[in-house]
Image (cartoon, helix red, strand yellow):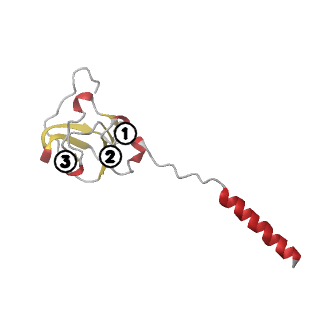
Amino acid sequence: MKHTKRILAGLAGAVTVLSMAPVSPAHAADGYDRCPDGYYCMFSGLDGTGDMIALRTNTPDLAALGMNDRAKSDWNRTASTIYLWSDTNYTGCTAVTSAGPTGKGNLFPTYQDFFSSVQFDGPGGPNCGTPPGEAS
């Protein structure tokens, strides 16, 4: 009986010590890493910072999601070519964000806070062009 009490007392002490051990919270994704696989994401800040929207379908008016004329960076984690339209309902001019490793980054400065609708796999419209002084 004394032996059992010692074991129980020892276990109680171990439980107390374990319950006082610091618990590290799970690291929340930040920056571009917030964008789920299989989605096209737009960010209101540079380098994947700020507000984010994650899209899987055509979006004729980004105002409905609070991102009209606000995107500064994006990441295309889909297999689709993404057409960014300057105006709502797929009007105006388009810029393209490709799938794969080139589909992540800051938008050209001229095109930051510029786009109003997003279309998956086109067809695209008139090209907005590469801004002067920017590499394509």
Callout 3 amino acid:
Ala
Would you name the residue on which mark 1 appears? 48
Cα separation between marks 1 and 3: 19 Å
Q: Observer-nearest residue: 100 or 69?
A: 69
Residue furthest toward the right?
2
Would you name the residue on which mark 3 appears? 63
| Mark 3 or mark 2, earlier in chain | 2
Task: Count residues near mark 1 (Cα–Cα under 10 Å), then give few for <14, some for 14-19, many for 20+.
Answer: many
Q: Quadrant of the C terminus?
A: top left
Would you name the residue on which mark 2 appears? 52
- Mark 1: secondary structure: helix
Cβ atoms at labels 2 and 1 below 8 Å apart: yes
Q: Observer-nearest residue: 53 or 37?
A: 53
Q: Picture coordinates of residue 108 (x, y %)? A: 27, 30
Q: Picture coordinates of residue 112 (x, y %)? A: 25, 33
Q: Observer-nearest residue: 117 or 14?
A: 14
